[in-house]
Each structure stands twice: as C-alpha cells, then as structure tokens.
Image: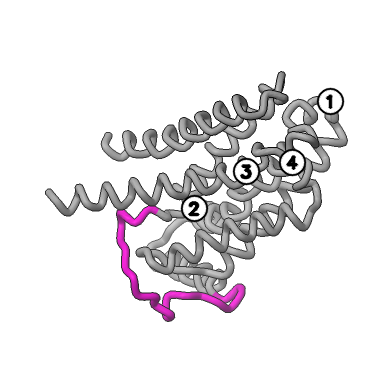
C-alpha cells in the first residue's frame, strides 16, 4: 500500500506542478486560446515521462553512492544484451523454465526499452512544430536517455549503452508513428499543436518542464523516502 501511495504521489505531483506553470503562462500570454488539446497533451506527456523515470529506476531510495564504478558501465554495444540472453537461456535450462516465459522476459527487457520511448518520439512533434525536424526529436530522446543512464552511475543499477541505443530507436519509431498519424488524421493532430507564434513565447519551455519536473520530483521524493526509511 505504501508503495502504491508513493507511486501515485510521484505521478500526481509533476502533473500538478506543470498545471500551475501552464496556468501562469496562460496569464502572462493570453493569446493561447481554445488549445485544450495542447494542454491535455502536455499534461499527458508529463505523465508519460514520469512513468518512464519510474520504470528506469532513477529514484535513489534503493541505493545511492557518489563514487562512479567503472566496472558497472557497459559501454560496448550489444555485449550486455547478448550476455543477458545467454544468462537467461542458461537459467531456463537449469530451472526448466518454459520457453514462452523466457521469450516474454527477453521481449520485455529488449523491446520494452524501445516501446518506452515511443511516446516521446510521437508526442514531441505532435505538440510542438519545432520538433517536426527528425534530428531534433531524436536528439531530445537521446539526451533524456543519456540523463537516465548517467543518473544510474550513482544508483544501485548498471549503466548500459544498449539501453541508450534502444531508447533512441524507440524515439525514432515514435517519430515515424507521428508522421503516419499526421498524414492519416491531419485535422485531429492539429488540435494538439501549439501555434507558431506561441512557440516563440514563454510556452516554449514546456517540453523541458515535461522532463525536468518529473525527474526532479522522483529524485527528491526518493531522497526523502530514503531518509525516512533510515530514520526508522
């Protein structure tokens, strides 16, 4: 129950903070009208990024250290994934684990890293026109993934270049999904997009706040929960 309460807290808090930011921006710049779709999309993007950070375990509650352990960094592509596949099949053979369970586990680990970043690649160009340049969206996804992997240097988790590659591929596929969606439903996608003049205003900070706020909230609550845990 405590874990569920913490999860709800971690999810709701960034959405509330971004809602306050949107409210302030709407008061500063009143040109933004009838863009319920864009605001809904921004809050949904905030929710998605919170889930991504929860799944990737950036919270320091499970372990935190200030020394960077080079031996825990997997910086050669594919090697760690092949090692994982080998270990899983060896374990399955020894413990007689059914093949479908093995494939499900491998699929969740490999394709999960791709699917997790798909929404980012889709939502960025959907919500903001300046992310309709493929390279900008992919770079944004790469930076987010790199931030996660860098954070894991100080946590009880390994840092893996394969995760960075798979996350970036997920961003690319998400962008491709946006291109297809926009061609099929141009009027629908237009409902979520910020106008050109608004992108040059203070509203342009929202792509960053959708990432930074969930990240900081989860890390801050992680340190708080860790302090409470050790105080007991």
Q: Nearer the viewer, mark 3 or mark 1?
A: 3
- Secondary element at image label 1: helix
**Alpha carbon of mark 3 to alpha carbon of mark 1: how far?**
25 Å
How many other residues sit within 10 Å of disc 1, few (<14), some (14-19) or many (≥20)?
few
Magenta residue span: 59-79
**Between disc 2 and disc 1, whose residue precedes?**
2
In magenta segment, residue 72: yes
Which residue does the image show at 40% across and 64% down from the upper left?
Answer: 157
**Alpha carbon of mark 2 to alpha carbon of mark 3: how far?**
43 Å
Relative to residue 148, is residue 35 depicted above or below?
above
**Alpha carbon of mark 4 to alpha carbon of mark 1: how far?**
23 Å
x, y percent for residue 152: 43, 64
| Residue 192 image-quadrant placement | top right
Q: Nearer the viewer, mark 4 or mark 1?
A: 4
Q: Nearer the viewer, mark 4 or mark 2?
A: 4
Point out which mark residue 200 bears.
Answer: 4
Q: Nearer the viewer, mark 2 or mark 1?
A: 1
The residue wearing badge 2 is 101
**Between disc 4 and disc 1, whose residue precedes?**
1
Report the quarter where the N terminus lies: top left
The residue wearing badge 1 is 187
Q: Nearer the viewer, mark 2 or mark 3?
A: 3
């Amino acid at each position: 129950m405590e874990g569920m309460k913490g999860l709800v807290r971690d999810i709701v808090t960034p959405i509330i903070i971004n809602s306050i930011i949107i409210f302030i921006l709407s008061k500063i710049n009143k040109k933004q009208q009838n863009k319920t779709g864009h605001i809904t999309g921004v809050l949904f993007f905030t929710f998605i990024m919170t889930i991504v950070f929860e799944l990737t375990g950036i919270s320091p509650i499970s372990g935190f250290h200030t020394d960077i352990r080079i031996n825990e960094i997997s910086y050669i592509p594919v090697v760690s994934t092949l090692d994982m596949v080998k270990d899983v099949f060896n374990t399955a053979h020894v413990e007689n684990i059914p093949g479908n369970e093995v494939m499900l586990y491998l699929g969740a680990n490999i394709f999960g890293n791709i699917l997790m970043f798909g929404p980012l690649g889709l939502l960025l160009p959907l919500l903001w026109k300046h992310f309709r340049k493929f390279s900008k969206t992919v770079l944004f996804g790469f930076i987010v993934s790199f931030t996660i992997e860098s954070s894991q240097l100080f946590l009880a988790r390994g840092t893996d270049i394969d995760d960075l590659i798979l996350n970036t591929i997920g961003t690319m596929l998400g962008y491709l999904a946006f291109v297809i969606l926009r061609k099929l439903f141009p009027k629908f996608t237009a409902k979520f997009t910020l106008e050109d003049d608004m992108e040059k205003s203070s509203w342009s900070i929202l792509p960053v706040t959708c990432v930074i706020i969930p990240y900081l909230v989860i890390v801050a609550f992680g340190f708080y929960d860790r302090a409470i845990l050790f105080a007991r």
